Amino acid sequence: MSSCQNHLTASPVRTDAEVARFETIDRYFLDWAREWSAEEVQFPALIDQTILKRAEFSSAFPHLLMSACNCVDPAKPTAKLLQAANLEPSGWLLSPAVCYHAYPRWEGATLTQPQILTARGRCFRNETELIPGRRQLEFEMREIVLCGEPDWIETLLPEARSRIEKVAAELGLDGRWITAEDPFFLPSAQGKALIQRLQETKKEFVVGDSPPLAIASINRHGTFFGERFHISLQNGTPAHTTCIAFGLDRWHTVAKAS
Amino acid sequence: MNKPLDPPAFASRELFARALCHFINHELPQLHKKVPSNLQVSRDTPLFDDGLIDSMGILYLINFVEQATGQTIPQQKIVMKHFQTVTAIADAFWMQPATP
């Protein structure tokens, strides 16, 4: 949490100059997406809980979920209004990432050509450790989401890596790629993390050493979302997806520091 | 992973590889019902193509290797080049038994 005039805020409050720098950073990635002829989309902050359930986010990362609630009895006294007993889930969750909005857009489709989409959005995760600019309850993320043939995706990834390195270099950042895994919650999901590590499906671009801070990631999902959202290639097999994610708050923090 | 027990002594890498094949083909399908019971994995069968070893299977596989060697596998050794086949696993993790 950061503070603004003694009020806690879930993400940093930025000045004019900071907003300008933030937008400049995002512009690198937006321009890149435009060069790839990506569809530009704006998604809402709330997401239907059934989408995250189908995407298995709810089972893999329940500890990160944040829910939008409403009051059972709005007439309760103020002291009791927001107590747990008077809250009920609305069915809407706060989006933990941008790309979960993308897959339902292609649901049921048989792709006649590869799809590229980009969106920037506010994301929310119930992190236990909060460090402004590095790990926040609320943060901004841009993603470039690829959906299509696996070979097509693989041909784009070396360029994606070199573009990220180039943006970092232009901002004076010294980064490196590491093989990473998602923070699965249940011990039974430990195998998923091991498979991710073995197959190197998640690569993070990190800066610094104590500890390294991931500012971008490339996440190869294989047919995971293609199967769950029934997105098909023309040969009838599930489409492959990959998302390239940029933690804009983190880029802003480390670029400022450098 | 479970704490390794006193490891069975595999006198050679060859015997270790044979035990691994037996584990994957005969014991793993009993432990993990998603693994087909008619597997015919040989030493050079790719273990991760087509989901042959999935997220539960890898846990059982690592547990077997740790039990068999008496050593915990460090995270930095969990890379595909050490796990892609039975031969790769045996090359990476079999150790000469200590002499009495």
Image (cartoon, rainbow, N blue to C red):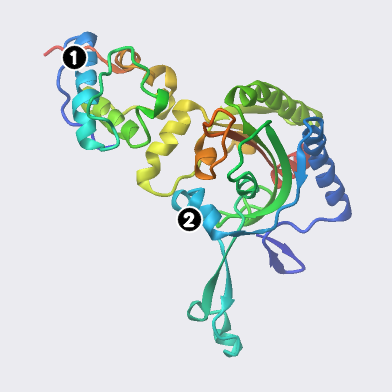
Q: Residues within 10 Å of mark 2 (few under 14, many from 20)?
A: some
Q: Can residue A137 be seen in this view?
A: yes
Label 1, secondary structure: give it.
loop
Structural distance between the alpha carbons of marks 1 and 2: 44 Å
Mark sitting on residue A236: none
Q: Position of residue B51 (x, y in %)?
A: 39, 29
Q: Which of the 4 quarters of the picture holds residue B30?
A: top left
- Image quarter where the C terminus of chain A lies is top right
Q: Position of residue A189 (x, y in %)?
A: 39, 43
Identified by mark 2, the residue type is His
Q: Which of the 4 quarters of the picture holds residue A127?
A: bottom right
* On screen, residue A150 above or below A250: above
The answer to whether residue B59 is left or right of residue A167 is left
Q: Which residue is drawn at 57% across and 33% down?
A: A239
The answer to whether residue A240 is left or right of residue B48 is right
The residue to which callout 1 is attached is: B97
Q: How crowded is mark 1: few (under 14 residues within 10 Å), some or many (20 or more)?
A: few
The residue to which callout 2 is attached is: A63
Q: Position of residue B97 (x, y in %)?
A: 18, 14
Q: Is residue A65 visible?
A: no
Identified by mark 1, the residue type is Pro
Q: Which of the 4 quarters of the picture holds residue A37?
A: top right
Label 2, secondary structure: give it.
helix
Q: Nearer the viewer, residue A159 or B30?
A: B30
The answer to whether residue B11 is left or right of residue A167 is left
Q: Which is in the foreground here, disc 1 or disc 2?
A: 2
Q: Residue at x 23, y 32 (%)?
A: B29
Q: Which residue is drawn at 20% across and 14% down?
A: B18
Q: Do the residues labelled 1 and 2 touch (CB within 8 Å)?
A: no
* On screen, residue A46 above or below A239: below
